[in-house]
Image: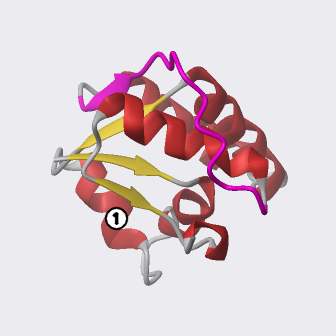
Amino acid sequence: MKIVLDTNVLLLAIPFGTLYYPVFDAFLNGAFELCVTSDILEEYAEKLHEKYMLRPQVAENTLKAIENSPDVVLITKYFFWRLITADPDDDKFVDCAVAANADFIVTNDRHFNV
């Protein structure tokens, strides 16, 4: 199974015991392929460093886990769909999902309810 993971879910899934932790745990255990683009990876890094400013090792360990995972597929986008008009920054996840032929976009963002 291929998924695209929105940054908001990644941030909520890292701490053990949260409602979203099973998503990150499933990724760590190879339950799915995580499809990403370079701009998604950049956003992951930016937001992880913002959230874990006081504990930078958490951000670095998470990014290393993503970087080193054999279950991460780097996708090259050749077309920009511009489907999320309410927040064009979210288009990167849709574009990645389409280019990867992903099964799911996992998000907690209401902008995807179009």
Residue 113 on image: x %, y %: 55, 74
Identify the residue at image location x=52%, y=36%.
95
Identify the residue at image location x=50%, y=61%.
14
| Res. 71 in view | yes
User: Residue 78, relative to residue 95: is it above or below?
Assistant: above
Among the 4 quarters of the image, the one containing residue 97: top left
Image quadrant containing the C terminus: bottom right
The magenta stretch is 71-86
Q: Nearer the viewer, residue 72 or 64?
A: 72
Q: Nearer the viewer, residue 3 or 30?
A: 3
Give the residue at mark 1. 23
Residue 51 on image: x %, y %: 77, 57
Identify the residue at image location x=75%, y=54%.
52
The type of residue carrying mark 1 is: Val
| Res. 65 in view | no
Reply yes or no: does residue 82 show up in magenta.
Answer: yes
Residue 27 on image: x %, y %: 29, 50
Q: Secondary structure at mark 1?
A: helix
Q: Estimate how packed mark 1 is, as few (under 14), some (14 to 19) or many (20 or more) residues with alpha carbons within 10 Å.
A: some
User: Residue 41, relative to residue 10: is it above or below?
Assistant: above
